[in-house]
Image: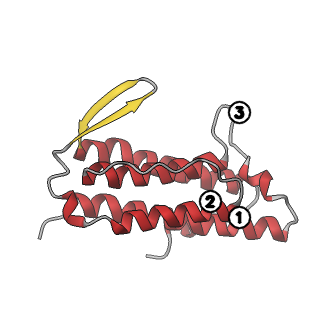
Amino acid sequence: MSFTIYQAAIPPCIHALSRLSFILEKADNDAEARKIDPAVFLSARLAPDMFALTRQVQIVSDTAKGCGARLAGLEVPKYPDTETTFPALQERIKQTIAYLQAIDPKAFDGAEDREVVLNTPHGEIRMNGAEYMTKAVLPNLYFHTTTAYDILRHNGVALGKRDYLGAP
């Protein structure tokens, strides 16, 4: 049996979302233990021109659900970006994972050659499914997951590599 685009895309998205959920749980517990208003973490950013933690999590969710939908030939679900608490972000992650798990893997048959069209602020980008997954989805997914981790680590949350990667 050959390795499929479904296997290359959806399990990594679910894993990244699951690890992000774990990291956010640690941050929420840390804020409580250190008596820090959670809004301090949620609005934190690494640089003035970067998105805050909340937006980083939303982008991970958007990237994952967009990947599943586009590669399966489905309409990308829209989630309002209204989360302002750790529980709300956890709910968004849970909803995204459930969406990905509900997509029939057979819907990905031929997705590596399916045209994907992205409308960006810089114009329309067209690529096939394999390029989309390897050049857009996975780099974006890991960039924003890592940035969320880095924001929290920078703010003193006791996180390490195992928290990001999970147990082998």
Seen at 85% across and 66% down, the residue is 34
The residues tagged by marks 3 and 1 sit, at their Cα atoms, a distance apart of 21 Å
Q: Amino acid at mark 3?
A: Pro
**Does residue 123 lie above or below 104 as drawn?**
above
Furthest toward the left, the residue is 1
x 34%, y 61%: residue: 10
- Between 19 and 88, the residue placed more toward the observer is 88
Q: Point out the frontmost of discs 1 and 2.
A: 2
Spatial CA span between label 3 and label 2? 22 Å
Can residue 4 be seen here? The reply is no
Q: Secondary structure at mark 3?
A: loop
Crowding near the residue tagged with mark 3, few <14, some 14–19, many ≥20 C-alpha atoms within 10 Å: few
Label disc, if present, on residue 48 of the rendered structure: 3
Q: Nearer the viewer, residue 106 or 26?
A: 106
- Measured in 3D between alpha carbons, the distance from the residue under mark 1 to the one under mark 2, in whole angstroms, is 12 Å
**Closer to us: mark 3 or mark 2?**
2
Foreground residue among 56 and 146: 56
Three-letter code, disc 1: Ala
Please name the amino acid that badge 2 sits on: Leu
Please provide percent x and percent y for residue 100.
38, 63
Q: Residue 114: x, y in percent? A: 18, 44
